[in-house]
Amino acid sequence: MSTLYLVATPIGNLEDLSPRAQRVLREVKLIAAEDTRHSRKLLTHFDIHTTLTSYYEHNQRAKLEAVLASLHAGDVALISDAGMPGINDPGYLLVRAALDAGHQVSPIPGPSAPIAALAASGLPTDQFLYLGYPPRKSSERRRALQQVAGLPYTLVWLESPHRLLPTLQDLRAALGNRQVVVAAELTKLYERFFRGSLEEAIELFEKEPARGEFTIVLAGAQPEEGIWDEARVLTALQAGSDEPPSQLARRVAIEAGWPRSRVYALLQALSKKE
């Protein structure tokens, strides 16, 4: 039987398209692409001339049989506009149909904005929950957030620039002033990370218009007994005196379940006493 390849494509930097991905895209009989105009530019850059067909959210059911017919005749690759196809992009129906028809499904790993942001966040990565895009309406968003409010896992979302600030505000209202990392334009020229509390993030993006695509990584719920008292925070700050102050404050804030600004204020007061 033929193979359906799920090929990860760059989320910004074209150098991230792996040699294996390039080879597979050249060798398959057909590439099913979320946006053929977008994908044709990528393929042209790498001198890949494989036949393209569109396969996106609003035509995936109508195109399913045609793509399966091509798969019966030879290998097919599925790509999205950026990142791993099937992760917040069309793909599930085709993967399920290909498996049910007896075909192999093989991932060609590569760029993924949620994983890249999580890995660089500085928040715990051993257990996390990826939640895609939050609901568009604030009322629906807050209801969805309440469902994950008590989970101890690091939480990850994607968000568009015009909804970033309202989403941060709803996160603060629904989940408290947790530590957050906001990653923008990952792998691109103007890649940047904000690391701090939700209140600090809101203050920043109230002043600075959001541009680009964003990934939000939020600390999980802290068990009440796991939140440190002031004496324990002070002990940790004294023990880490050889670290750069901002790094020390950020690390202790995450471990203690405190806002970074409060830990930093304690650190400054401790430094003055010494």
Image (cartoon, grey):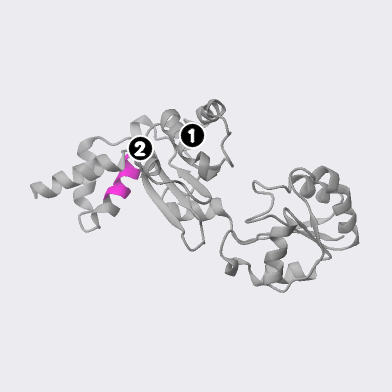
Location of residue 79 with respect to 57 vertically, above or below: below
> Bounds of the magenta span?
249-256
**Callout 1, which amino acid?**
Leu
Residue 250 among magenta residues: yes
Task: Describe the element under mark 2 as helix, strand or loop.
Answer: helix
Instruction: Identify the residue position indicated by label 1 in the image.
Output: 151
Residue at 9% across, 50% down: 274
Question: Where, quadrant-wise, is the N terminus in this rendering?
Answer: bottom right
Q: Which residue is mark 2?
A: 199
- Residue 163 horizontal/vertical position (percent): 52, 39
Give the Cα separation between the discs numbered 2 and 1: 20 Å
Q: Which residue is at the far left? A: 273
Give the residue at x 72% y 72%. Answer: 23
Q: Nearer the viewer, mark 2 or mark 1?
A: 2
Q: Is residue 258 left or right of residue 72?
A: left
Q: Residues within 10 Å of mark 1 (few under 14, many from 20)?
A: some
Residue displayed at 14% across by 44% down: 269
Label 1: which secondary element: loop
